[in-house]
Amino acid sequence: MFDFLKDYDLLGAFWTTVQLAALSAVGSLIWGTMLAAMRVGPVPLMRGFGTAYVNTVRNIPLTVIILFTSLGLNQTLGVSLGADDVETINFRLAVLGLIFYTSSFVCEALRSGINTVPVGQAEAARAIGLSFRQVLGLVVLPQAFRSSVVPLANVLIALIKNTTVAAAIGVAEAAVLMKEMIENEAQLLLIAAIIAFGFVVLTLPTGLILGWVGKKVAVKR
């Protein structure tokens, strides 16, 4: 029943999915943290930019963003992100699009964590002469990250599933392989079940592990 699988690189497709998710997660965490800092910062222009970015990007379909990276950045503006071959260019553009989209959700998850930090702690830090950057980096963000582990885990799980949208620009991940297998084999339900099981293997342990971590590091108040 599973003999047809030997003709397809199933592990390779899911490895591409893992790479997409991992690189996008790191980039989204960095950019999302910067956006969260902007949203709670004292500079009105930065607060306005952070708010506008998050509210705009969260309401744009991910497919539109991914297609824009290919049709807009690459084909129209010639952005290649330092790559020469089409496959690598599309992969990097997909990572960029996923970062652009997911960072808005990371920002909101972190901002919810920031809101759990008592205001008195920030005021006390400012009273002893710490700058806004020091207050944020030394007092607020460490506690915000501890409070945001579970929401960030949900964002990561959504990101893993959202990597399938990269198929729209030809990135050879699991969704592209599924499409190819369905076109070539008369095993629709079996193929769908195999791909679905693969994503469960990726997302279920992630949720369980990060949920456990969230309970361990949660700030006791």
Image (tube, rainbow, N blue to C red):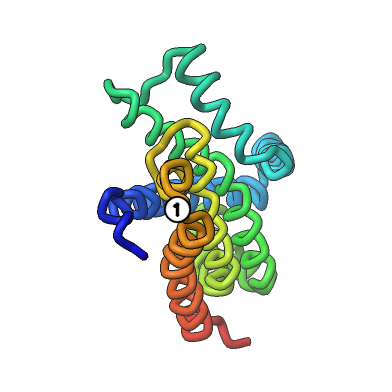
Q: Residue at x 69, y 34 (%)?
A: 45
| Location of residue 72 with respect to 134 vertically, above or below | above
- At x 41%, y 37%, the residue is 171
Q: Is residue 156 visible?
A: no
Residue 221 figure quarter: bottom right
Q: Which x, y percent locates residue 18?
A: 37, 55
Q: Would you say 39 lies left or right of 183 here?
A: right
Locate residue 2, reporting x and y percent.
34, 63
Measured as percent of width and height from the top left, residue 98 is found at: 51, 43
Left or right, residue 64 beside residue 189: right
Dot 1 lies on which element? helix
Q: Is residue 191 above or below residue 221?
A: above
Residue 15 shows up from this direction: yes
Amino acid of disc 1 = Ala
Q: Residue at 36% of width from left, 65% of height from top?
A: 1
Report the number of discs.
1
Residue 66 higher or lower than 29, as above or below: above
Q: Is residue 73 left or right of residue 82?
A: right
Return the x and y of residue 193 as percentages of the image width and height: 49, 64
Q: Residue at x 30, y 60 (%)?
A: 3
Which quarter of the figure has residue 85? top left
Viewer-proximal residue among 170 and 149? 170
Few, some or many residues within 10 Å of mark 1 (<14, 14–19, 20+)? many
Q: In this view of the protein, which residue sits in the foreground, 123 or 89? A: 89
Q: Nearer the viewer, residue 146 or 125?
A: 146
Q: Which residue is mark 1?
A: 25
